[in-house]
Image (cartoon, grey):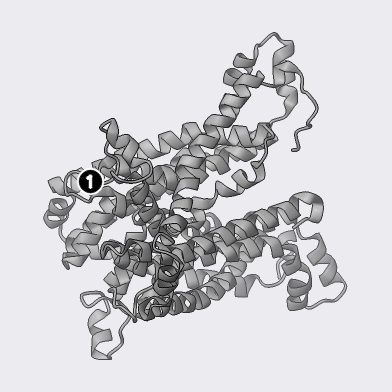
């Protein structure tokens, strides 16, 4: 056994063998299979599949709706985190627990519940219908579903940063003559920006790939309200494996870019916090 | 950090009016986006009365779906607990080349769309997949069958326990473990009596999250299941079938079961957090 201080503990060999074996079999080989399969397509076939107008419309819709959902969550997520950390009001603990609901509720359940709320005769949809806004079965419905799905990501990344913020900073700013508005916008906001960026990226990445909550509320019209994961699903059901694989690969690469970005953002945010 | 209830200096707080507006806006947003959907599930579930609710749940096809979902969770959760503990142990307690890459790979299922998660197994084991023809020749069914559902669920839920334990183990240090070893405990004894108790609350939470996702996974399972009623139909898929069949109150009745699982998950999380915060430690 090595004399390295961290190697004193037993169990490295069995733990790492099990981990690497499991990750290889369950995650690495299946993902590599996808890459290999699309490599066998040939560039012309690959390009035709990923650049068809229907696919491009689906990417566009997925990116726009995920960005819209993540933006709504960035605003309201910070607000919710702020209210939960800074203020005391009856039911605060309950509200705090409820924030994780989208993590725990199956996406299909969220999908049918939101659809029934926002349909034209639904609890919320009937009021919106009166002012001429249609949510269910339009891209707006997708944004609603992705807002639901993404909310905890922003709240849960911003909340700990707000909790750790030491009041002395605000005191110092006040002593130096800053008003409350200046303290919030010029002292507190800059501190939470890295966490907010991570939360936004997490919500955005989750929104890009989301399927269950969206398919019920989206209407699923090709070129209009058909998200990329649904297009992949449709191609699979038509046994168009080549087309499905090509689009999935483009999507997978986008997901991994997001994952690496998020990891880099998180590392930077942690490094900053430690540096303070 | 607990905020004292005593009035704070003015510069550290908003005016009362601002505060109320902020709380009100946040609560209105949460009611609209989180509470109403949850309430809607239960209201719609009981729309046609308690007997219709009971009938929807005791319907033989629903019972088969519930059995299948429980079975899948009973297989998937223990496997991913063993994996999660082993992965967190290896990564948190030891330095080795490729450590960061391993963490990224473990996280990968979180970043992959559920549809793609299911699809990779279709590409491997499906009729036109890499080893599909071999499987057909040997009469082994994975896709559109039970093993495919288990594989897709394993894939999707694999990061939960590892992700929950990793930061916890990293932050805890090894003093107690080293003391146990010095006192002559074997590796296993040390792990069972020292390391495991140290992570028990984090582990519980990881298990609960993993279980909620295993029971509720929709997209990945939808790709590999083939929707065969009574055979490969999980509870979320059954909800979809009922809903698309315009049997709305039955769909919401079955969905209410999954919502109860979700609420229990949140309750356990809140309890664990309260315990940890009140000084019980992990």
Name the foreground residue: B24 vs B117. B24
How far from the left and from the top, in percent, is residue B143? 30, 77
User: Left of A115 or right of it: where is B111?
Assistant: right
> Residue A208: in sight, yes or no?
yes
User: In x, y percent, where is residue A155?
Assistant: 55, 40
Q: Which residue sits at x=50%, y=54%? A: A103
Image quarter of the N terminus of chain B:
top right
The answer to whether B119 appears left or right of B40 in the picture is left
In-image side of A250 versus B221 (left or right): left
- For disc 1, the neighbor class at 10 Å (few under 14, some 14 to 19, many from 20) is many
Q: Residue at x 37, y 42 (%)?
A: A144
User: What x and y, as percent, mark residue B149?
Assistant: 38, 74
Residue B200, relative to residue B132: is it above or below? above
User: Which residue, as the protein is rendered here, is positioned at the far top?
Assistant: A177
Q: Nearer the viewer, residue A39 or A121?
A: A121
Give the residue pinned by disc 1: A225
In the rendered image, residue B174, in percent from the top left (x then y), is placed at 77, 60
The outermost residue toward the right is: B183
Q: Chain of mark 1?
A: A
- Residue at image position (15%, 48%) is A54
The answer to whether residue B156 shows anywhere in this view is no
SS of the residue under disc 1: loop
Quadrant where the C terminus of chain B sits is: bottom right
Q: Residue placed farthest to the bottom in the image?
A: B138
């Amino acid at each position: 056994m090595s004399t390295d201080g961290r190697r004193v503990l037993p169990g490295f060999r069995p733990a790492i063998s099990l981990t690497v074996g499991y990750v290889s079999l369950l995650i690495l080989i299946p993902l590599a299979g996808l890459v290999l399969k699309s490599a066998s397509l040939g560039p012309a076939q690959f390009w035709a599949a990923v650049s068809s107008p229907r696919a491009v419309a689906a990417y566009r819709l997925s990116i726009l709706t995920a960005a819209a959902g993540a933006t709504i969550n960035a605003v309201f997520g910070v607000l919710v985190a702020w209210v939960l950390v800074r203020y005391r009001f009856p039911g605060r603990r309950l509200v705090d627990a409820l924030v994780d609901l989208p993590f725990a509720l199956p996406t299909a359940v969220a999908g049918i519940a939101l659809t029934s709320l926002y349909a034209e005769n639904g609890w919320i949809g009937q009021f919106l219908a009166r002012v001429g806004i249609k949510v269910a079965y339009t891209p707006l419905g997708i944004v609603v579903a992705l807002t639901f799905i993404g909310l905890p990501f922003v709240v849960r990344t911003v909340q700990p940063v707000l909790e750790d913020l030491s009041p002395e900073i605000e005191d110092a700013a006040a002593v130096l003559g800053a008003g409350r508005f200046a303290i919030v916008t010029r002292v507190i906001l800059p501190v939470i920006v890295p966490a907010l960026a991570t939360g936004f990226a997490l919500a955005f990445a989750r929104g890009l790939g989301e399927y269950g909550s969206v398919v019920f509320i989206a209407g699923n019209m090709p070129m209009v309200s058909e998200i990329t994961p649904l297009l992949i699903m449709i191609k699979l059901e038509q046994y168009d494996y080549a087309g499905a694989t090509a689009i999935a690969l483009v999507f997978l690469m986008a997901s991994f870019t997001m994952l690496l970005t998020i990891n880099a953002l998180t590392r930077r945010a942690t490094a900053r916090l430690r540096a303070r | 950090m607990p905020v004292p209830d005593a009035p704070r200096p003015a510069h550290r707080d908003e005016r009362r009016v601002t505060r109320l507006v902020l709380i009100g806006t946040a609560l209105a947003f949460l009611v609209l986006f989180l509470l109403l959907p949850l309430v809607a599930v239960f209201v719609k579930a009981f729309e046609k009365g308690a007997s219709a609710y009971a009938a929807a749940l005791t319907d033989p096809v629903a019972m088969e779906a519930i059995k299948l979902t429980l079975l899948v969770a009973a297989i998937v959760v223990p496997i991913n607990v063993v994996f999660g503990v082993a992965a967190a142990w290896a990564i948190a307690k030891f330095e080795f080349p490729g450590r960061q890459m391993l963490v990224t790979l473990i996280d990968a299922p979180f970043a992959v769309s559920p549809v793609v998660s299911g699809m990779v197994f279709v590409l491997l084991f499906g009729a036109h997949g890499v080893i599909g023809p071999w499987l057909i020749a040997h009469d082994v069914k994975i896709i559109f069958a039970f093993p495919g559902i288990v594989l897709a669920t394993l894939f999707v839920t694999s990061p939960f326990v590892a992700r929950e334990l990793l930061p916890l183990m990293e932050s805890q240090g090894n003093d107690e473990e080293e003391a146990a070893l010095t006192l002559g405990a074997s590796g296993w004894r040390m792990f069972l009596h020292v390391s495991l108790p140290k992570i028990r609350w984090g582990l519980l939470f990881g298990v609960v999250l993993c279980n909620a996702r295993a029971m509720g996974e929709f997209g990945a399972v939808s790709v590999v299941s083939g929707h065969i009623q009574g055979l490969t139909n999980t509870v979320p898929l059954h909800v979809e079938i009922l809903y698309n069949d315009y049997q709305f109150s039955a769909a919401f009745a079955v969905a209410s079961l999954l919502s109860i699982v979700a609420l229990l998950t949140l309750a356990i999380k809140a309890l664990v957090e309260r315990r940890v915060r009140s000084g019980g430690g992990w």
